[in-house]
Amino acid sequence: MLTAAAFVPSPPLLVPQLAGAAASETDRLRRAACDVAGRLADSCTEWTAIGVAEAGGAAVELPAESLGTFRGFGVDVRVGLSEGAAGDPDPEMPLAALVAGWLRGRSAPAASARVRVLAADTPARDCVRLGAQLRAEFDASPVPQGLLVVADGANTLTDKAPGAFDERSADLQTTLDRALAGGDPAALTALDPELCAAVGLTGRAAWQVLSGVFGGEAGAGQPRKAESLYSGAPYGVGYHVGMWLP
């Protein structure tokens, strides 16, 4: 049974040791992400996390026994996808999995997460299909299940953004934010992959998996409640934290 779907962004700056002097600037975002992870854990301790590979990265699945490190981002902060994760940390663990593991360890140590990272160019129909498959698995499970989407919005919202500025990004980010805040899976399904790629809306594939979990274009499983805990673009990248309840 699916109990809740939470969504958080993936900036390494969520981790205080990586944020340095910017830790205070990202504190509200960090608190919101930790809060929503804690809420997800209140409803279940078995999570499936969905993310998107970084540019050029391949799709990958990681079991809950996986261990990783943020060493590639400057500090050897180690994270596990479950309390029992042990061994040598994977220095190549995808960022979405690292963020999921860090949030789990900080806010939900009793939880475990399997992670599925999609290629950035995964077709929309495949994302929605995967979401529907996951929903069927969740609903067939006798153990409460949670979904954690780790995904960003557009990275071209200001002149100093990582992807520079693209005048098309503001309207697209507004569409995404409204869909997430309003619990609108059909609007997520309708995101144009080509436009998203052009303006650096890197989380598109993960957002469309979320859509599929809640009915896709038909919206047959539209959430009974949608809550937004944070929405902003502190570094020219759209970040959104929230939760949908089935």
Image (tube, rainbow, N blue to C red):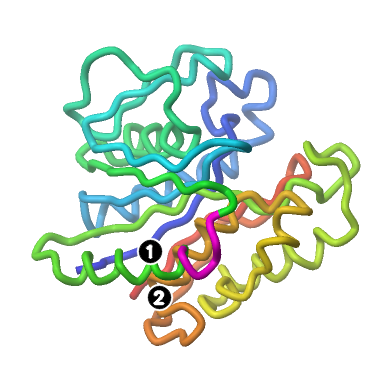
From the viewer's perspective, is residue 15 above or below residue 209? above
Q: CA distance from mark 2 to mark 1?
A: 11 Å
Any mark on residue 170, and which? Answer: none
In this image, 213 relative to 54: left or right? left
Disc tally is 2
Quadrant showing the C terminus: bottom left
In this image, 227 relative to 83: left or right? right
Q: Is residue 162 visible?
A: yes
Furthest toward the left, the residue is 142
Residue stretch rendered in magenta on the structure: 122-126
Residue 106 coordinates in the image, percent (x, y): 36, 33
Task: Residue at 65% x, 72% y: name it.
Answer: 178
Q: Main secondary structure of the magenta part?
A: helix
Select label 2 or label 1 by which is in front. 1
According to the image, label 2 marks what residue?
A: 214
Tell me if mark 2 has few (under 14), some (14-19) or many (20+) residues whose alpha carbon lies within 10 angstroms of its own: many
The quadrant in which residue 111 appears is top left
From the viewer's perspective, is residue 105 above or below residue 90? below
According to the image, label 1 marks what residue?
A: 130
Q: Is residue 32 visible?
A: no
Question: Observer-nearest residue: 61 or 138?
Answer: 61
Residue 153 coordinates in the image, percent (x, y): 66, 53
Task: Residue at 23% x, 59% y: name it.
Answer: 145
Mark 1 secondary-structure assignment? helix
Q: Do the numbered discs 2 and 1 sit on residues whose CB atoms are within 8 Å? A: no
Quadrant showing the N terminus: bottom left
From the viewer's perspective, is residue 75 above or below residue 27? above
